[in-house]
Amino acid sequence: MTLNIENIGSISFITVPGTTLDASSAKAFKTAIAPALVPAAKVVLDLSELKFVDSSGLGAMLSSLRQLNGVGGDLKLCGMNKPIRSLFELVRMHRVFEIYNTREEAIRSFETADPAPTPAV
Amino acid sequence: MAAEESLADRLREAFADFSALPGIRVELETASGARVEIVDGPAAVEPSVFAVEENGARLLVFLSSPASGAEAFLLDRAVRAVLDKIEVEKREEQLLDELGTNWESLEALYEISTDVLRFGDVRSALKRLIERFTSLQDSLRACLLITRSGRLEPILGNPDVPPAIDWRHLGPIATPILESRAVVINEAISWPDSDDVMPWREATSLAAAPVTSRRQTVIGLLLVWREDRRFEFDAPFCRLLEAITHQASMLLESDRLNRTMLENDRLAKEIEIASSIQQTLLLGNAPADIPSLQLAAYSAASQHIDGDFLDFLKHDGAVDVLIGDVMGKGVAAALLGAATKNQFLRAIANLSIKGGVPSPVDIVNRAASRLGARLVALERFVTICYARFDPARGCVEYVDCGHTGILVHRKLTGETFFLRGDDLPLGIYLEDTWHQHSAPLMPGDTFLLFSDGVTETKNRDGDLFGEERLIECVETWSSLGPDLLLEQIRRECDAFRAGESQTDDFSCIGLRVHPGPEDVLRSSRSQEFAGDLEFLTSALEWLRETAELGPEGLMRLESAAAEIFANCVLHGSGKGSGEEGGNPVRIDVFNYADHAKVEFRHAGPPFDPMSVPPPSFDGSRDGGFGTFIIMRSADELIYARNGAINSISVIIMARLS
């Protein structure tokens, strides 16, 4: 899996390719994102291309968040569609991740250092 | 004088050889200054003086003529050798006496240890102990006192048993005894005022040792005394007293344990009988043959017997459920529960004779009118919920008299809520009115009736399990059906208690309405997919095309199906977690009027959804989400094992818009 990484200021936007992040692709995603999980990195995962995430995909994102938090970095999510948002809410992960509707909202959250995201729809 | 004569005789015997020596005279000078001849000889002026005993007696040795240095030295050594010999012999005699006494004491102890075992009751054994002990010495008196309600009660005495006394009446011996120390006083004691009746008031020698419990708490004392002035209790006697008192402590402790054991046996038998009565009278069996309804019941009492009761009454495709909780616990509550349930059954029978099936409110009114006065008189009350579940009419009618309400999880809307009434429990007022409520009963609904012992399950910090956790349980596990739902509620409450004992009765009734009729099958299709995650996407695409569900239903089916397929491939290979297996996954889709049933079949190790630990929602762990997603996405989840094949079926209902 090749991730599209775009740096805007100090923030790295990573677009997850393909329409699914599930058991068949979660392992490849973890391998591909590993180089970006460096100390103090500010990472935003753009999920706008994704249509479906299962527990394996969710676990891969959770693992990335924990790794980054462990080295002083942060990982936020944006561009999530409604079914994926429902899955996050079902397993309460909307309380663990900061989720934003757009990239701009995610950038502003880093600039203001305000951890409270506006409700994503 | 007798002692001095005895000493003189011993000295004469010891110094007999000196009589053969010329020019030597030996005299004993007593403490009072009197002189007694030991060896006859010529008197001389300056004697050599030797101390003989601690009481001040001296031995005077006279020589008729002055001795040379060597002679004086030899004489001195010879006299001291004789005196030492006397001292050794005397000590030997004392040791022999003491050994004799100790031997007698040891024998007595052995006799007591073996004797007391023959006595059936502790009083006889203690009496034997005291009697045997006091027989060791003439004029020895004894009294065993045990604390009861803060006072010392003499339970045995020789020869007299005094009345109960306070610790202060023991004067100088109270403090050492309370500090678990033996005490010996070999003189007349100045006792506190009052009680002339204490038999040891005239004691001239007194010894006492503490009687202690298993935990070394002082629970009394054994007191012995004599009234003859010349006698003194010595150290060996004190040790014997302590041994006897230890024996008394053990007898009392053994008796206490024995009584506790007998009492526990009696209680256990009573509880066993009451428990079987409870199972027979209080707990009804959930009917299993009601079309379109599944029922399960579970009850666990906090003291094996309790006031929770429940019953079921099946009629015309509907089922009436009665659940109640009597204030209090134990046999009294169980009997009252049985009486209450009996009144409800009589009310149903009486009203049914008059025509038709009575309404829940009529049943409650009838039973309450018979019970109210008795409950008020007994100062007891009973909470009940009487509910009728009628799938044909699509409604549940209920009367809630101060009970916990009915928890409903509605699959068709995804909502979870309580049905509650606001009537008071039975037994609060003599005259009261009861109200019947009605609510829709929909396909896929899960209803939970429970006693407050469920939500009031406590952990060690005193936190309650509460309604929120119960709602979470129902939302997560209701797709497995009422049997497994109740089992999971019990497991989660047990886990929440974390070893703390269950303090309240715990009763649950689960009821699920079938998702919908399966008599008209609109369509069905089957497809087999290779056991490889590469085919997950194509399997999900096939399901989207095949299952006749709206977008919301398809989304939930997709979530559940992805987890089940991945589970079959990753964990069903038998090669260990994460190893992909080669066995294919067969998927069957059955489309009915208002729901779709999708069955996944796969050869692999057994998969038990109940065995998967729940996920951690704080993000600290990755595991457990898959099973959780399946159960929350599916409206019904059925797992079966057919030979080596796992069959996992999910039912997805078309939700109301």
Image (spheres, coloured by chain):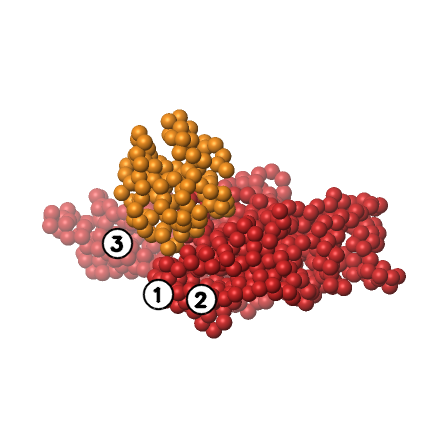
Chain colours: A orange, B red
Q: Residues within 10 Å of mark 2 (few under 14, many from 20)?
A: some
Assess disc 3: are there few (<14), some (14-19) or many (≥20) residues with their C-alpha within 10 Å of its C-alpha.
Answer: many
Q: Position of residue A44 (x, y in %)?
A: 36, 37
Q: What's the residue at 57%, 67% (across, down)?
A: B119
Residues at marks 2 and 1 on the same chain: yes
Relative height, residue B205 to residue A95 (above, below)? below
Residue A48 shows up from this direction: yes
Chain letter belonging to callout 2: B
Question: On the rendered structure, is B210 left or right of B67?
Answer: right
Q: Name which of mark 3 and mark 2 comes first in the sequence.
A: 3
* Residue B493 in picture, x, y percent from top left: 55, 52
User: Mark 3 — residue?
Assistant: B83
Q: Which residue is mark 2?
A: B528
Within-10-Å neighbours for mark 1: few <14, some 14–19, many 20+: few
Q: Which residue has dot 1 on it?
A: B575
Going by the numbered disc 3, the residue's amino acid type is Leu
Dot 1: element: loop
Q: Reading the chain from its start, which is encountered first: label 2 or label 1?
A: 2
Which residue is rendered at x = 42% and y = 38% of the image? A78
Q: Is residue B503 left or right of residue B561?
A: right
The amino acid marked with disc number 2 is: Glu
In three-dimensional space, the C-alpha distance between marks 1 and 3, rounded to whole angstroms, equals: 97 Å
Pair 2/1: label in front: 2
Q: Chain of mark 1?
A: B
Give the amino acid at mark 1: Lys
Chain of the residue under label 3: B
**Residue appearing at x 37%, y 55% in the figure:** A24
User: Which of B123 and B20 lies nearest the eye of the viewer?
Assistant: B123
Q: Position of residue B412 (x, y in %)?
A: 62, 51
Disc 2 secondary structure class: strand
> Which callout, 1 or 3, points at the residue further toward the start of the chain?
3
How far apart, in angstroms, are the residues tagged by discs 3 and 2? Answer: 116 Å
